[in-house]
Image (tube, rainbow, N blue to C red):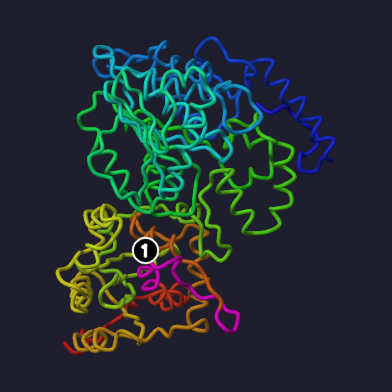
């Protein structure tokens, strides 16, 4: 725990900060919070206890991870929980790294693994089945800020798994999104071997792209999402670096499917936060939160989670909290970091980078982003769809170029001052076939929010029929449309009996609704029942200036669609008026042209 101070660290002079930091590190080392020399015993249990009693400051998630470990110790070896914690097996890779490996970066002669690393490594390797001795954890997510020793940890564990895990024909893969990054990881492992007489004797001189351990016919190689050769893998240990850069599951799925013949394979993801808010990392992060916040539900029993992050953006201005995202803080240039932070926080883009990379808060680096991830997650209310039967709503749709995403919404103004968004999306099979993240689309389809239709394009009749079916359940007051792409559909809507109105696409007409919608999101008043597809749409929206210096919405890039948001913006231009319209007593309602024609 950071020592109490009377003056804010950001307000200290350089001399004051340097003195305080020296005293802090000395105090931490006096009781074991910071290790100067290798500790002879495994500290997994000790670290968990220190997080729970708050002797060591940690994120809410890591406090939960510590409680998970201590909870599992109490029930270990039972019929319902057949895993036991083997201290020797948990400590073995730690001793190996400290004895045989030399850091390839920084001014350090040898590794002294810190208590948090005892917790991570000890948990991954110490939990085993009581009868078979096989490892409990098949996957692990280690989520820490940059410069917390991720690369060295990858190199040390990779060489350990290559020759010291008692596995015949162990195939070890260091993995990244691009070949150059995977090669860099491999090169660091090669350097680690070359710097250690013990490892050189064990492995021999590393080749350009492979390290071998001949006695067990084992090897280590780099692989990336863009590698030419991804078939025929047989993974014993796969360790991914920075999966925040991954936009799809291609390489992840290859590695997962390649471990089928292995007795106790392990896949490890070590990463910081990032800017791809719809990729695998966000999915794994959400799974981690669900697991750690619901310990009694025993979710993901065979996946380990360590989620180091600040608990809020406001904690960035309190460096005593930085340890939450940077458990290796005592080995970092803390005083220099503070100087850099004070300078960089004046620039919005630089601050966003700090929040994301150093403090592990999902943030979009573009200062013109419409809303950030915390704001999206704030709008997490769920209501019963059946309660909307017969209620008034406004429709909106966004017709894509016919071969891409097409979306429609119904927006309900609620008596509470909130709004509810009902939405649906269509894509043609040809578009699905060329998508890089088919698993995500299939998930949206399974949740009932997307339809993959046959052929090469989206016929507008799918949208027409959706509105017709919904009109049997709800009172659709009006449907708003963008004239540029909707003339034919608009005529069919009118022919059926719907009231339609053009939503002119420009700041003068959409600027007000857009600002109001954002304000409602900031207040947590937008309800969409936590639908992943709609959340994705929201996370993809950024703002650009028009020639009159007004902001208009656009997508982050060509692969990140905003069609559902665009459809909502059309509907919200009318719903906004309904929300602020005076309420009168009496039986007042809406009547559609269809009803009048009857």
- To which quarter of the image does residue 315 belong? top right
Q: Inspect this view and state whether residue 298 appears.
A: no
418 to 134, vertically: above or below = below
Provide the residue span drawn in magenta.
Answer: 546-568
User: 485 or 88: nearer the eye?
Assistant: 88
Residue 559 position in % (x across, y down): 37, 64
Question: As drawn, is 533 to the left or to the right of 358?
Answer: left
Q: Is residue 269 magenta?
A: no
Number of disc labels: 1
Query: What residue sits 47% from the left and 22% below the top?
Result: 200
Residue that mark 1 sits on: 420
Q: Secondary structure at mark 1?
A: strand
Quadrant in which the N terminus is drawn: top right
Residue 387 position in % (x across, y down): 28, 59
Q: Is residue 549 magenta?
A: yes
Query: What residue sits 32% from the left and 72% below the top?
Result: 392
Question: As drawn, is 50 to the left or to the right of 223?
Answer: right
Question: As drawn, is 431 to the left or to the right of 565?
Answer: left
- To which quarter of the image does residue 205 belong? top left
Query: What residue sits 76% from the left and 39% below the top?
Result: 9
User: 1 or 578: nearer the eye?
Assistant: 1
Estimate how packed mark 1 is, as few (under 14), some (14 to 19) or many (20 or more) residues with alpha carbons within 10 Å. Answer: many
234 to 197, vertically: above or below = below
235 to 527, vertically: above or below = above
Q: Inspect this view and state whether residue 112 appears.
A: yes
Quadrant in which the C terminus is drawn: bottom left
16 to 365, vertically: above or below = above
User: 55 or 256: nearer the eye?
Assistant: 256
Residue 382 position in % (x across, y down): 35, 53
Residue 529 position in % (x across, y down): 34, 55
User: 403 or 551: nearer the eye?
Assistant: 403
């Amino acid at each position: 725990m950071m020592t109490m101070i009377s003056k804010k660290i950001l307000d200290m002079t350089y001399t004051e900060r340097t003195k305080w930091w020296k005293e802090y590190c000395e105090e931490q080392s006096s009781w074991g919070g910071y290790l100067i020399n290798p500790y002879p015993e495994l500290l997994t249990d000790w670290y968990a206890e220190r997080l729970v009693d708050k002797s060591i400051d940690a994120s809410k998630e890591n406090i939960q991870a510590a409680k998970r470990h201590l909870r599992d110790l109490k029930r270990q070896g039972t019929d319902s929980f057949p895993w036991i914690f083997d201290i020797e097996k948990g400590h073995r890779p730690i001793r190996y790294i400290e004895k045989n490996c030399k850091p390839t970066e920084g001014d350090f002669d040898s590794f002294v693994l810190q208590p948090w690393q005892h917790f991570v490594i000890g948990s991954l390797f110490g939990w085993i089945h009581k009868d078979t001795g096989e490892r409990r954890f098949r996957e692990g997510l280690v989520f820490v800020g940059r410069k917390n020793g991720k690369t060295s940890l990858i190199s040390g564990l990779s060489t350990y798994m290559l020759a010291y895990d008692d596995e015949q024909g162990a195939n070890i893969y260091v993995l990244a999104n691009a070949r150059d990054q995977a090669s860099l990881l491999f090169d660091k492992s090669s350097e680690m071997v070359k710097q250690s007489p013990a490892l050189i004797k064990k492995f021999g001189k590393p080749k350009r792209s492979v390290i071998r351990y001949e006695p067990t016919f084992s090897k280590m190689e780099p692989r990336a999402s863009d590698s030419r050769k991804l078939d025929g893998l047989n993974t014993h240990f796969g360790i991914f670096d920075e999966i925040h850069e991954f936009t799809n599951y291609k390489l992840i799925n290859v590695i997962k499917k390649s471990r089928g013949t292995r007795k106790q394979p392990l896949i490890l993801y070590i990463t910081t936060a990032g800017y791809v808010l719809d990729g695998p990392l966000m999915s794994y992060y959400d799974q981690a939160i669900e697991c750690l916040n619901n310990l009694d539900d025993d979710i993901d029993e065979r996946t380990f989670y360590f989620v180091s992050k600040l608990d809020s953006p406001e904690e960035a201005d309190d460096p005593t909290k930085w340890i939450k995202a940077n458990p290796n803080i005592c080995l970092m240039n803390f005083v220099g970091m503070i100087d850099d932070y004070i300078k960089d926080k004046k620039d919005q883009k630089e601050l966003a980078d700090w929040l994301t990379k150093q403090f592990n808060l999902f943030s979009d680096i573009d200062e013109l982003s419409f809303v950030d991830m915390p704001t999206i997650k704030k709008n997490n209310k769920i209501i019963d769809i059946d309660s909307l039967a017969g209620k008034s709503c406004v429709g909106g749709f966004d017709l894509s170029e016919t071969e891409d995403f097409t979306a429609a919404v119904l927006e309900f103004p609620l008596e509470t001052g909130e709004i509810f968004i009902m939405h649906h999306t269509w894509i043609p099979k040809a578009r699905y076939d060329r998508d890089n993240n088919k698993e995500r689309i299939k998930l949206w389809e399974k949740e009932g929010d997307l339809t993959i239709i046959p052929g090469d394009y989206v016929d507008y009749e799918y949208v027409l029929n959706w509105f017709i079916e919904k009109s049997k359940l709800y009172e659709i007051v009006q449907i708003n449309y963008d004239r540029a792409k909707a003339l034919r559909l608009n005529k069919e809507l009118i022919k059926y009996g719907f009231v339609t109105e053009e939503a002119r696409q420009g700041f003068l007409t959409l600027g007000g609704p857009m600002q109001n919608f954002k304000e409602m999101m900031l207040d947590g008043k937008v309800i969409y029942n936590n639908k992943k597809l709609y959340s994705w749409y929201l996370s993809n929206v950024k703002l650009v200036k028009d020639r009159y210096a007004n902001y208009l919405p656009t997508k982050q890039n060509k692969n990140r669609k905003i069609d559902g948001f665009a459809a909502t913006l059309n509907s919200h231009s009318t719903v906004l008026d309904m929300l602020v319209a005076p309420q009168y007593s009496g039986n007042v309602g809406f009547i559609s042209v269809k009803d009048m024609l009857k």
